[in-house]
Image (tube, helix red, strand yellow):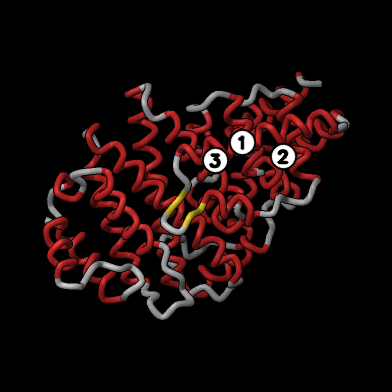
């Protein structure tokens, strides 16, 4: 078992150290050979050590000498393998959440690095990023289903996961990538339904997702990240993408995802003036310094704990109450600005007919416009 072999290595002065190439390789090989999850996690401390090793392996920096996409892919396979073994057994609930949070953390880390490299992202790195994002979506589906079935017990894990998801969707690079997988942002809608409107408002305010989505709508999905991703996949034929994908296709997915996110935000928060004002405020002001939130949520060995996330949400709520006392937004301007992208879609339909705007998108926009109009 992993624990016995690890202790043997420790005794020989060869402890597993993720900063050491040989130690990390040894840890990976042991984890790949593991057959019993009970041997891997006999207690919380043992599992936490393993989770950290997996997280570090997924989040290697492309600029370091130890960087190896092949090795990262092996860590991802271990994540998938462990997830399948833990599913359906309540005894491994904490392991399932830990594995999913590792994926959230690695996406946030890698998307920031890749966003800084413009078009200089190797094909295999983009392939890996795509695979990690797709794996997270699979995990989100399973975790949401498990939570709905159990009903209670993981509320704080849900809130932590939703905050991580909102941070991913607030980042242009990772959001554009996810948009190509699911343009209607279905997973975000499902998870937004798992928390109360008050909690969702706090998470949205902290992540700035509403403003980010509205900015992308304003630009019709055009931004540096959509162009960067298109250049990478068109030059290299990255796996998971249609070889006939055009820049317009990437931008359309980005735009449609942003519309869908806005619709979910408005409906799940009741279409109140408060949520519309929040989205507009995020849209018009300078985006919050991302370093502050990232440094609070992303720690050296993974994302913040559920308790730390609760602290972040409470601090944000206090700040939001203070700002609401001094803020003096013109609600009519906010309503008009948030409604504008949905009205734009309907104008396209009126001028071009149904050949461009399908029924699903028409319903999405019509319902959202009606909701916003009721808030006037």
Query: Closer to the camera: disc 1 or disc 3?
Result: 3
Label 1 sits on a secondary structure element that is helix
Image quarter where the C terminus lies is top right
Residue at (61% x, 25% y) in the render:
198
Rendered location of residue 233, percent (x, y): 51, 68
Give the quadrant of residue 357.
top right
Query: Disc number at residue 184?
Result: 3
Label 2 sits on a secondary structure element that is helix
Among the two numbered marks 1 and 3 on one chain, the one whose residue lies closer to the N terminus = 3
Rendered location of residue 77, percent (x, y): 28, 58
Q: CA distance from mark 3 to mark 2?
A: 15 Å
Q: Is residue 75 above or below residue 375?
A: below
Query: Disc number at residue 345?
Result: 2
Q: Is residue 123 above or below residue 203?
A: below
Circle 1 residue:
361
Binning the other alpha carbons within 10 Å of mark 1 as few (below 14), some (14 to 19) or many (20 upward) gives some
Rendered location of residue 43, percent (x, y): 22, 43
Q: Is residue 341 left or right of residue 72?
A: right
Rendered location of residue 86, percent (x, y): 23, 41
Comparing 47 with 254, the one in front is: 47
Q: Is residue 328 left or right of residue 248?
A: right
Instruction: Kindly check if marks 1 and 2 are in contact, taking CB atoms under 8 A apart as contact.
Output: yes
Give the quadrant of residue 257.
top right
């Amino acid at each position: 078992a992993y624990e016995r072999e690890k202790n043997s290595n420790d005794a020989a002065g060869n402890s597993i150290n993720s900063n050491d190439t040989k130690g990390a390789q040894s840890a990976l090989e042991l984890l790949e050979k593991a057959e019993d999850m009970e041997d891997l996690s006999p207690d919380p401390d043992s599992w936490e050590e393993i989770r950290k090793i997996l997280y570090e392996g997924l989040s290697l920096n492309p600029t370091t000498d130890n960087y190896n996409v092949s090795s990262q892919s092996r860590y991802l396979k271990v994540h998938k393998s462990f997830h399948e073994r833990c599913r359906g057994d309540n005894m491994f609930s904490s392991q399932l959440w830990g594995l999913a949070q590792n994926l959230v953390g690695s996406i946030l880390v890698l998307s920031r690095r890749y966003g800084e490299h413009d078009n200089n992202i190797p094909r295999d790195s983009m392939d890996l990023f795509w695979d990690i994002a797709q794996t997270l979506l699979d995990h989100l589906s399973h975790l949401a289903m498990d939570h709905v079935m159990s009903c209670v017990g993981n509320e704080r894990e849900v809130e932590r996961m939703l905050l991580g998801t909102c941070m991913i969707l607030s980042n242009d690079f990772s959001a554009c990538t996810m948009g190509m997988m699911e343009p209607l942002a279905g997973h975000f809608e499902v998870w937004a339904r798992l928390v109360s409107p008050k909690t969702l408002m706090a998470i949205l305010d902290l992540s700035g997702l509403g403003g980010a989505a509205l900015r992308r709508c304003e630009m019709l999905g055009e931004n540096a990240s959509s162009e960067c991703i298109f250049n990478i996949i068109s030059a290299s034929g990255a796996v998971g993408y249609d070889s006939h994908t055009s820049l317009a296709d990437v931008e359309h997915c980005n735009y449609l995802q942003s519309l869908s996110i806005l619709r979910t935000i408005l409906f799940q928060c009741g279409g109140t003036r408060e949520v519309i004002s929040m989205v507009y405020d995020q849209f018009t002001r300078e985006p919050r310094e991302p370093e502050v939130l990232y440094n609070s949520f992303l720690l050296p060995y993974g994302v913040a704990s559920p308790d730390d996330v609760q602290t972040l949400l409470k601090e944000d709520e206090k700040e939001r109450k203070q700002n609401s006392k001094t803020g003096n937004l013109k609600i009519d301007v906010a309503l008009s600005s948030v409604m504008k992208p949905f009205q734009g879609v309907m104008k396209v339909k009126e001028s071009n007919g149904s050949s461009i705007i399908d029924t699903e998108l028409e319903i999405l926009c019509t319902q959202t416009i009606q909701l916003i109009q009721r808030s006037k």
